[in-house]
Amino acid sequence: MVASVRRVFELWGLYARLDMLYVLRGPQIALSFYVSDLILGMAAVTAMFLLAQRFDGIPPWSRDQMLFLLGYALLVRGTIDVFFNYNISFISRRIGRGQLDHVLVQPQPLWMVLLTEGFAPVTGAGMLLPGLLLIGWSVEQLQLSVTFAWLALLALSLACSIVVVLAFSYAWGSLAFWAPRSAEELNSSTWQLLTQLDVFPLDPLPTLALTGLLTFVPAGLVAWYPARALLGIDASPLGWLGLPAAALVLGSLCLFIFMRGLAHYGRTGSTRYLSYGHRR
Amino acid sequence: MRAYLKTAAMSAGTVGDSPLFLLDYALRLLRVIVLLSLWRAILGNSTATGAMPLGAVLTYTLIGEVFAYQLEARTSLPNAFWEGTIVLRFLRPMGLVRQFVAESSGVWLVHFALFSIPLLLLSPLLGVDPRPASPLAAVLFAVSLGLGILVGLAIEVLFAALTVGFEQPVWLVHQMRMAVGTLLSGSLLPLAYYPWGLGELFSWLPFASTAWAPLAIFTGAGDPLRLLLVQVGWVLVLWPLTNRLWAANREKVVGYGG
């Protein structure tokens, strides 16, 4: 256990150096990656921000609460970009392109490769700073009391939100084990499903739509649900227990589907290196 | 002309190659439902004021989704760069931009039939009146939509030229264009509701000519004459610029394969 943890940190260090070397190839590459992430992140939340500013909030959320929601959504995306970059969070691409073989031949357990190989603390950090600034600004404006328990809840919620996003991505992305060609870009669609809908305050939605966005398409679990608990809008036990429970269920379901797919892959392999392969 | 029609028909036939478009439809439907609910929450109470009444905003949102592909002027140009198939298109005895227009038209028609028309039929269930502000608004909307597509295509080719010229990653530039375009064009939220006068400022930019102009005409939220003149202005400015930039950069296109 201790050796595995040490190895994970060693690999993170290694991939951080590689990421840094990539950026050091020249300012053009560094700027294009960092600035594009920054622009993408800001554009994703700016429309909701402008709306919240125009109407001093979106009922029942005040303007500053909306800023917190948007900052939290950016933080989730930014953290995923830092830790699960290079198509680790878009696993359908790796599977569909036959690149899972590159992972399987490494002398590391699969989980360790998936946890470390996408580490991009330089090129993937474009959304982190705006997310943290928005959260910091809104916490200040809302005069939230930032205790150790609140920070622990923030960290737990962030981890659970990331699990939800990745579980959704991997559950759908695993279809590429069975249909590598048609499902190769599946995670682009699943990613859009979650990230385009996670910045909205979902309170006014009809029950049926809200239920759908907390279960089948769990965009509500990415930012809206945890932000309610962190801001005290939902102070019930379900408010802060619901997300870890959902993350556990979705994570288990994703693991089941992914392992089934992997077992299938073990029998069929990839067509990438065959003469009739679609990525040949 | 027959060649372009055939290209459009062939392109339409590729929609079913992958079932991913169903997820796109799910996203679009969910986005409409969420946005309609938000507008009702914001404008439903009597204290909220705005440049457009609630009914017009709901219509704007619905029609914006019905014509989403046209308002974004979404083509397969970035994909052609990514897959290297742009090289094959250079070899065909057809204009490059016209090929992409033909391909896009075919795809747009399929999605219009499979998603947009059903969404329009669902409008009573969603509580939205999808009719234009007036019969004249409907006619001017069609003109404005055509101009908007022309501006959108010019922006698409302009960004393609810049991608090649500055040797930038295709998808990076494409995603940035889409993200910034969504914000500046008013395709997600009406520009009339942007604070600090930003909407007025954005309405003069080319992105606004792709979505805000036709939708504002449809819902009666803007002066049609001014909106159409701005659109015509951007068509006249952007296409010569785009042609010049593309001509200067087209020979720098490099295909590596996927």
Image (spheres, rainbow, N blue to C red):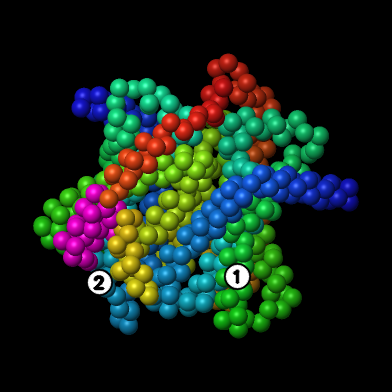
Above or below for A27 versus A156: above
Magenta stretch encompasses residue B231: yes
The answer to which image quadrant residue B86 occupies is top left
Q: Position of residue B254 (x, y in %)?
A: 50, 30
Residue A257 in sight here: no
- Residue closer to the observer: A276 or B143: B143
Residue ID at (75%, 47%): A17
Above or below for B180 versus A147: above
Question: Residue placed farthest to the left in the image?
Answer: B135
Residue A62 in sight here: yes
Magenta stretch encompasses residue A127: no
The residue that label 2 is drawn on is B53
Above or below for A179 versus A149: above
Q: Is residue B143 left or right of residue A75?
A: left
Q: In the picture, which quadrant includes the C terminus of chain B? A: top right
In the image, are marks 2 and 1 on the same chain? no
- Kind of element beneath mark 2: loop
The residue that label 1 is drawn on is A133
**What is the chain letter for disc 1?**
A
What span is colored magenta in the figure? B209-236
Q: Name the residue type under label 1.
A: Leu
